[in-house]
Every structure is written in C-alpha cells, then in structure tokens.
Image: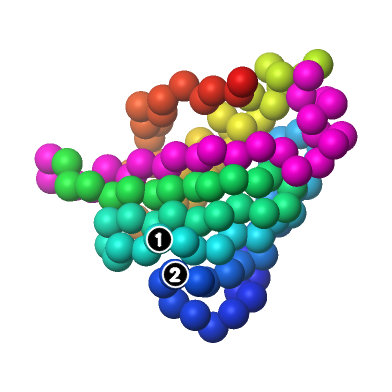
Amino acid sequence: MVPLNDLEGVGVRVAVHVKAALPYHMRFEIESTCYDRPFVAEVTVRGDPNGRMRWTLTSEGGGTRARFEEEVRTGRRLLDLLALIGKPAFAWNHRRMMVTGEAALRRLLGTEARCSDHEPVRHD
C-alpha cells in the first residue's frame, strides 16, 4: 500500500496492489469514508474492483472479533468476461487470499494463526 495523502481518519487515500494465486494483479485505490476508532473503518474502493469494504471490531469472550465485509464489482471488462466461465476459480482465489491475509494479520498482532469461521463468499 502506498499512501496518497497525509490525512488520518476519514479522507485517507492509499494505492493498493494485490497479487493472489491466479496469474493476474489487481490495482485500486481505497479512501476512508467512515472511521470510528477502534470499532469501525469503512472505505470506498476504485479501480480493478469498485465498491466498499468495512472492518468492524467487537469484544467477544476474552478477545476481539474482526469482521470484514465487502461489496465490490470488478472494474475490468476482461475480468467480467473471465468470471463468467471461471467463477469457481475466482471464488477459490478469493478464499485463499482472505485466509492468507488473515494469517498475516494474526502474525502482525502476535496471535495464533488458525482457521476462522468465515462466512461463505457470495459471487453473484
């Protein structure tokens, strides 16, 4: 991620480059639209995917539950066409990317990496 401005909270913009298991790269910008530290962060996404992403932190038991939600569509015509025939591969790629991201976040936070109870990924 590359910061695009010096703001903190709402209005922060960063450029993101993502490479997952399938042989393509996604590039996009995210801009913070809602920031209620330490509970909620929401961003608008523009580029290869377009839409919104939201992170919510809540107390649970002796720890914290991190919930990630996204409502995005591709911003590339080629991905739209490939998604029609490669839907299972794209779903697999997304699940793998999310599990890898979760493991990296757990390492960063110093918590034990384990499979979580991910809700099913919808690709309609």
- Determine crowd level at label 2: few under 14, some 14-19, many 20+ residues with C-alpha closer than 10 A: some
Q: Residue placed at 59% from the left, 45% from the top?
A: 51
Q: CA distance from mark 1 to mark 2?
A: 6 Å
Q: Identify which residue, 85 or 73, lies in the foreground.
A: 73
- Number of numbered discs present? 2
Front position in the image: 52 or 1? 52
- Position above or below: 5 against 93: below
Q: Nearer the viewer, residue 99 or 31?
A: 31
Q: Which residue is mark 2?
A: 10
Residue at the image point whose x is 81% and y is 41% from the top? 76
Q: At which x and y percent is residue 41?
A: 39, 57
Q: Circle 2 sits in a helix, a strand or a loop, which is it?
A: loop
**Does residue 39 lie above or below 101 as drawn?**
below
Q: Is residue 113 left or right of residue 44?
A: left
Q: Say whether marks 1 and 2 touch (CB < 8 Å).
A: yes
Which contiguous range is marked in magenta? 61-84
The spot of residue 118 in percent (x, y) is: 41, 28
Which residue bears the numbered disc 1? 34
- From the top left corner, tell me how far across and down residue 82 is, in percent: 83, 25
Q: Quadrant of the N terminus?
A: bottom right
Pinpoint residue 40: horizontal percent, then vertical percent: 33, 55
Q: Secondary structure at mark 1?
A: strand
